[in-house]
Image (cartoon, rainbow, N blue to C red):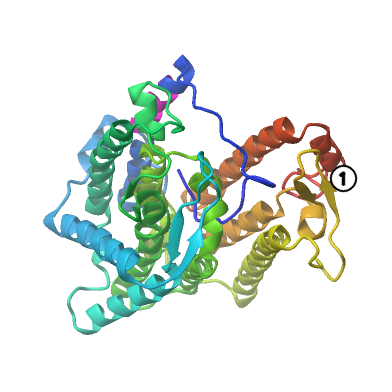
Amino acid sequence: MTSPTTAQDSFGGTPTAPRPTATLFNVAMAMVLLPALPILVYYLWISLEFNHGLPAVPSVALLARLPAPTPASALIFVGWLGFHALLQTCLPGKSVEGTPIGDGSRLKYTMNGWLAWWLTWAMITAGLALRLFQPTILAEQFGPLLTTANLFVFVFCLYLYWFGKRRGRSGERVSGNPIYDFWLGTALNPRLGNFDLKLFFEARPGLIGWVAVDLSLAAEQQARCGAVTVPMILVCSFHFWYVADYYLHEEAILTTWDIKHENFGWMLCWGDLVWVPFTYTIQAYYLVEHTHDLPWWGATGIVFLNLVGYAIFRDANLQKHRFRKDPTRPIWGRPPRYIRTARGSLLLVSGWWGVARHMNYFGDLLMGLAWCLPCLFGSPLPYFYIFYFTILLVHRERRDHAMCARRYGDDWLSYCAQVPYRIVPGLY
């Protein structure tokens, strides 16, 4: 699974990810998660749709609630993918080289996400103005779209598995076990000509679809209640801003762990097309029915929390990005401090990176909490995101710590002594 965060998992250079090992445990986990994760998302939707946003009691009877695809959901899904594939292919954008791959070469990417983002909203606005579709259509088709997306991912990932096996390039990280390789993928950078499949699915249809579903749910609240509440406005605004900021700094995705090291298989593809648009919208879905208001001081406090989280998240990432380009550039008005490792890499200990090893994660978590708080405390479901995201980022930090400890040895111990906190200053 993935997230839209542009947080970077490695501190310097381009560490080589180890070849995946198809141990009995790893294969068993893949076999469990392949059905369990879709079931979890269906359970969350059923609880929101049929149990007033409260966790439903698991039972066989819930199977009757599973939605079938509809012609409308199929048309929306295929049209959405095709539209964004066309934008990815045809829109102009800055040509950027990625990090070195196994043979030392660098793939080229066209960064046109910022233009695609705004063109998408222009086209949606035009479609609404011309009454080609209703603003509530994604909310109304949410269940069928969920099934349509799941079916597409399973079929498409069979193609991805075949694509990687057919190419059989040396250096691709495959285990040899078909189940585990279907889960993780058999190709690092599957491309159709110059069209990069991993970058497309990571950065386009699911991510913009997340915000589109949010806004459709806001329209559904308007249709039911005659108004859009302040909590709904906050949630939609926070998400819109977050994804817009992602596209404004789109180039940063090329240094993330997913792009550099993860093969493109079911895990990433399902996370992009199902997990992100159908679980990151839980707060908006919950607020359709729960139309409470917020006092001005509560709304102000939530906005402030989101702004603080964003400021830390964005400034920390920019400090690291600028430091990698120019290690002499001042940070907070002073020359940067760093540890030069025996390998020649530089470990930054200035600015946010001297406060905690992953202050960008801390900012991300503050924003995530701000997204949940507008829903108040009538149900735990709107807080699913912050619980999941905390586990995800702690796991990423632990993985990064282990990789850097192997890579830098005693230099990493010195770094940890200077920056003892992992994510949360003074706590963790």
State the residue in front, 337 or 131: 337
Judge left or right: residue 228 versus residue 249: left
Residue shown at 83%/42% (left/top)?
Answer: 415
Kind of residue sitting beneath label 1 = Gln
Give the extent of the magenta segment. Answer: 28-36
Residue 34 lies in the magenta stretch: yes
Which quadrant of the structure image shows residue 187? top left
Residue 177 in percent (x, y) is at 37, 21
Which secondary structure class fits the magenta region best?
helix
Residue nearest the viewer, comparing 314 with 388: 314
Q: Would residue 137 appear left or right of 294 to someone viewing this image?
A: left
Compared to residue 352, the image places residue 409 above or below, namely above
Query: Callout 1: helix, strand or loop?
Result: helix
Residue furthest bottom as drawn: 129
Name the residue that disc number 1 marks.
Answer: 418
Determine if the magenta segment contains residue 166.
no
Q: Is residue 196 above or below residue 29?
A: below
Instruction: Give left or right: position of 332 versus 86.
Output: right
Label 1 packing within 10 angstroms: few (<14), some (14-19), many (20+): some
Residue 390 image-quadrant placement: top right
- Quadrant holding the C terminus: top right
The image quadrant where one finds the N terminus is top left
Which residue is pictured at 67% across the width and 55% down the height? 360
Residue in view at x 64 percent, y 69 percent: 307
Asked if one can make out residue 207 in the rendered structure from this viewpoint, the answer is yes
- As drawn, the residue found furthest toward the left would be 71
